[in-house]
Image (cartoon, rainbow, N blue to C red):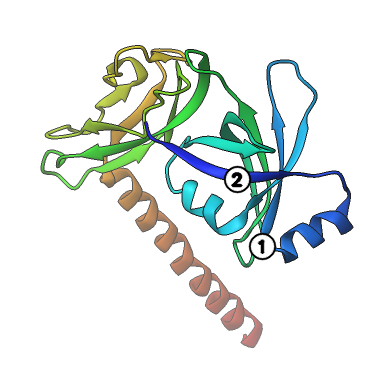
Amino acid sequence: MAEVKIIAQARTEFGKGAARRVRRANQVPAVIYGHGADPKHVSVPGHEFLLALRTPNVLISLEIDGKSELVIPKAVQRDPLKGFLEHVDLLSVKRGEKVTVEIPVATEGELAPGGNLLEHVLNTLSVEAEATHIPEGFTVSVEGLEAGASILAKDVVLPKGVTLAIDEDAVVIQVVTAQVEAEETEEEGAEGEEAPAVAAEAGEAAEA
């Protein structure tokens, strides 16, 4: 995968007030962890980092005081209303090093006729991959699958050098029948219709 180069600045001030000043300067507070070293506090340009995050598990080459360090995002905090970045945790990695990451799973193809539904039990697949060769995503075919069919973690084709980090029999995607949901909806409707009838009977009794 391609590397994204971003220039970061070391931070020496901490706390909420310092973090607000960093954000006012269109920067994002970040902390770098990994390899047993003390955490490094830096700030990164908000817009550039937001663009980089469009690629899942993006590999970032941070330039800090003239030195380069490879990192991947591990936790991202966003403002719940406006969506801008508030804080980022970064994991320091080395070339050749294996890391455990969550990879998005997408589907392609059409289910067998019958109006059945596709349920994503897992939206991401936990795998172990070399830090500089992390897959951007997995695509699995659901072509012709019928109700009751499922795709397990072991059914997902992984690139060379990538291994599962979860139980291979974990269900990733399954096909469920739509009739069950339809029956539940009808039952709920029937229960709702009974209530007015009971109320009417109670009113008639009161008038008597």
Q: Position of residue 31 (x, y in %)?
A: 73, 37
Q: As rendered, which of 125 and 93 lies closer to the eye? A: 93
Of residues 112 and 36, the one nearer the viewer is 36
Q: Name the quarter where the C terminus is drawn.
A: bottom right
Q: Is any atom of residue 122 visible in this view?
A: no
> Relative to 154, is 77 on the left or the right?
right
* Three-letter amino acid code at the position of disc 2: Ile
Mark 1 Cα-neighbour bin, 10 Å: few <14, some 14–19, many ≥20: some
Say which amino acid is labelled 1.
Asn
Q: Earlier in the sequence, mark 2 or mark 1?
A: 2
CA separation, marks 2 and 1?
13 Å
Eye-nearest disc, 2 or 1 = 2
Identify the secondary structure beneath mark 2: strand
Q: Give the residue at x 13% y 35%.
A: 143
Q: Residue at x 50, y 26 (%)?
A: 101
Rendered view: 133 above or below 107 = above
Asked whether residue 184 appears in the rendered view, the answer is: yes
The percent position of residue 195, horizontal first and vertical second, equals 52, 68
Residue at the disc numbered 1: 26
The circle drawn on residue 7 is: 2
Q: Residue at x 55, y 44 (%)?
A: 6
From the viewer's perspective, is 150 left or right of 197?
Answer: left
Q: Quadrant of the N terminus?
A: top left
Seen from the viewer's position, the closer of residues 69 and 204 is 69
- Toward the viewer: 51 or 117? 51
Report x, y in % for residue 44: 65, 49
Tell me: residue 167, above or below residue 74. above
Among the 4 quarters of the image, the one containing residue 9? top right
Secondary structure of the residue carrying numbered label 1: loop
